[in-house]
Image: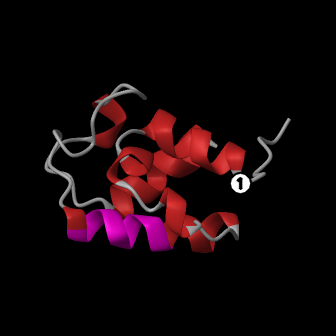
Amino acid sequence: MTDDIRQLIKEFGRLPVDVDTLATDADLYQAGMSSHASVNLMLAIEDHFDVEFPDRMLTRGVFESIDAIAAALTELGVQVPA
């Protein structure tokens, strides 16, 4: 799941740094992600994982790091492939 999230961040996060160099707990906003890019990332994540984030999860904290995104997806029932 982490690799998929990283790839989506590369494509939609518009970060000025190489996503592969970021720790999974690195703050994506501090790394340069804008709020507009986070919306695009959210939509891409929803499409990729076939989920919909409920309103209560539409917060900055959910998209703050790779770990936070993975935790949200796990909460939504996305299974990590074995």
Is residue 69 found inside the magenta-colored segment of the image?
no
Give the left or right position of residue 48, taking residue 11 as reference: right
Q: Which residue is mark 1?
A: 76
| Residue 39: x %, y % from top left | 35, 70
Quarter of the rendering containing residue 38: bottom left
| SS label for mark 1 | loop
| Residue 53: x %, y % from top left | 58, 66
Residue that lies at the very extreme toward the front in this rendered image: 56
Secondary structure that dominates the magenta span: helix
Give the left or right position of residue 57, taking residue 25 as reference: right
Type of amino acid at the residue the image marks with label 1: Leu
Q: Residue at (75%, 52%) from the top-left corner?
A: 78
Q: Residue at (49%, 33%) from the top-left corner?
A: 67
| Residue 74: x %, y % from top left | 70, 44
Q: Residue at (40%, 65%) from the top-left corner?
A: 41
Residue situated in front as seen by the camera: 55 or 33: 55
Q: Residues within 10 Å of mark 1 (few under 14, many from 20)?
A: few
Which part of the image, by quadrant, shows the C terminus? top right
Residue situated in front as seen by the camera: 9 or 54: 54
| 67 in relation to 46, above or below | above
| 24 in relation to 76, above or below | above
Which part of the image, by quadrant, shows the N terminus? top right
Is residue 40 found inside the magenta-colored segment of the image?
yes
Q: Which residues are magenta?
A: 36-43
| 14 in relation to 77, above or below | below
| 16 in relation to 40, above or below | above
Q: Residue at (62%, 67%) from the top-left corner?
A: 48
